[in-house]
Amino acid sequence: MQEIDWSATLIRMSGGDEEAFRTVYDATRDHAYKLITYLAPRKQDACDIMSEVYIELLRSADNYRPEQPFTAWFNGLIVRQVRNWKRKGWRLFRIAEKTRSTAGAVTDWHAEDQLSAISHEMELLPLLGSLPHKAREVIVLRYYQDCSLEEIACLLSIPLGTVKSRHHHALKQLRRLLNVTSDGKERSSYVY
């Protein structure tokens, strides 16, 4: 992200300065979109979640403290909005899952997901979708946003030990996913 006097810009933005909002938006939109697409439960929701992030940014700009890095504060805001979106959509998701399972479409979705993961085997991004949301958050913040485990604990408001545990289990699951061939059998070599 660009170097900006975040404190002054956010103060102007919360006072209704449209140019200040444009400055913040232009400086953060690519970063926000990437992080949202990594964390979003469904990629087609990314634009809607992005709107929610910037609405919340307008509401909470006064909460920014100049002594903390803007990127860490903004990442926390994005993570919370993705979680909120996921909570809102949970009931609809469960209904859709029950509908699919009664229609016999679950097997087709599973096969399609496996095929997608195998065809992009060397890319981590397709495999992130198979991780539980909490594990995905830790992996994305650690490897795509270069946050330390301590920063992740602070951002997610969870103990450091929990972050380490989620990180360990997520890496273990990703290794296992990378170690499966198209016929469903494990390869003999271990992927690190």
Image: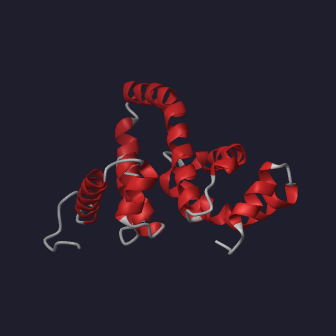
Q: Where residue 103 appears, x then y in whole percent?
A: 41, 27
Quick one: quadrant of the C terminus?
A: bottom left
The residue shown at (31%, 50%) is 159
The quarter of the rendered structure image containing the N terminus is bottom right
Picture residue at 71% right of the left edge, 44% below the top: 55
Residue 116 visible? The answer is no
As drawn, the residue found furthest toward the left would be: 188
The one nearer the camera, 51 or 178, is 51
Please say whether residue 13 is visible from this viewpoint: yes
**Is 146 on the left-hand or right-hand side of 77?**
left
* Residue 74 appears left or right of 132: right
Locate residue 87 relative to residue 17 in the image: left or right: left
Q: What scheme was used to colour the molecule?
A: secondary structure
In percent of width and height, residue 117 lies at 38, 60
The answer to whether 57 is drawn above or below residue 125 in the figure is above
Q: Residue at x 69, y 46 (%)?
A: 51
Give the residue at x 83% y 49%: 15
Where residue 37 sits: x, y (%)?
A: 55, 56
Residue 105 found in image quarter: top left
> Which is nearer the eye, 156 or 9?
9
Viewer-side residue, 133 vs 154: 154
Q: Nearer the viewer, residue 121 or 88?
A: 88
